[in-house]
Amino acid sequence: MDGPKSVLANLDNAEGSHYEFLGCDSIQDAEATVRQVTRIVCMNDSAEEEASNCAELLVDGVEGKVARLPWGCGPGNHVVVRSLSVSENQQLPASIASRKRGDSPVMDLAFDFNFPDIKKSPDGEITMRLDFSTVPQWAADAAPMKPKPAAAAGGGAAGEL
């Protein structure tokens, strides 16, 4: 998925997010409208370290924002954020507390999978690429594709593959 930061947030620390999930095992495969909560913490909010990207989640508010989760955290890679609030449970595992920079609190991230109800943005559209094949090992051998500009795509929509 790609789009403006006002409607999309990447919370996957393998892709550079400074958020750490403390409760991936609590995320269930549930009906789209069922609200779930997991705990997250910003691992770097210190001005002395490299610039923190935790504030990107807050750009134009969190309600209705699509967020990418870390791989293996729940039944899908993306959720619709409903709220972000300070958690009553501020405890951190020792392995996480020893790596944390700054004093940001542990937060409760409330979300669901109700994608028809995502935030609308005047900044642009959300685009999504889906690759699928029944050929074994196809995904391992596939090369990433870049979107084509509208003119190169024969007048189609911008970013058309």
Image (spheres, rainbow, N blue to C red):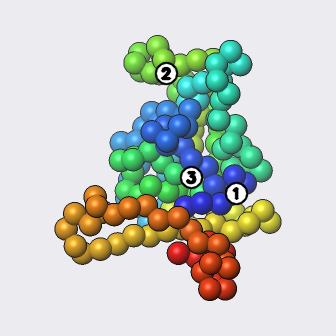
- Earlier in the chain: of badge 1 and badge 2, it is 1
> Is residue 5 at all visible to an observer of this figure?
yes
Q: Could you tell me the amino acid type at mark 2?
A: Gln
Which type of secondary structure does the marked residue at label 1 adopt? loop
The residue lying at 24 percent from left, 75 percent from top is 134
The residue lying at 68 percent from left, 15 percent from top is 48
Drawn side of residue 127 relative to residue 60, left or right: left
- Earlier in the chain: of badge 3 and badge 2, it is 3
Residue 67 image label? 3
Residue bearing the label numbered 1: 4
Which type of secondary structure does the marked residue at label 3 adopt? strand
The residue lying at 55 percent from left, 37 percent from top is 17
Residue bearing the label numbered 2: 91
Q: Could you tell me the amino acid type at mark 3?
A: Ala
Which type of secondary structure does the marked residue at label 2 adopt? loop
Residue 81 image label? none
Mark 2 crowd level (few <14, some 14–19, many ≥20, 10 Å Cα): few
Drawn side of residue 69 relative to residue 116, left or right: left
Q: Nearer the viewer, mark 1 or mark 2?
A: 1
Q: Nearer the viewer, residue 112 or 66?
A: 66
Drawn side of residue 23 relative to residue 54, left or right: left
Q: Nearer the viewer, mark 1 or mark 3?
A: 1
Q: Is residue 137 above or below residue 62?
A: below
Q: Nearer the viewer, residue 159 or 85?
A: 159
On the image, the x and y values in percent for residue 86 come to 64, 32
Drawn side of residue 70 relative to residue 108, left or right: left
- Earlier in the chain: of badge 1 and badge 3, it is 1
Q: Is residue 23 above or below residue 44?
A: below
On the image, the x and y values in percent for residue 9 come to 61, 49
Q: What is the spatial separation of the Cα atoms under label 1 and label 2, in whole angstroms?
A: 33 Å
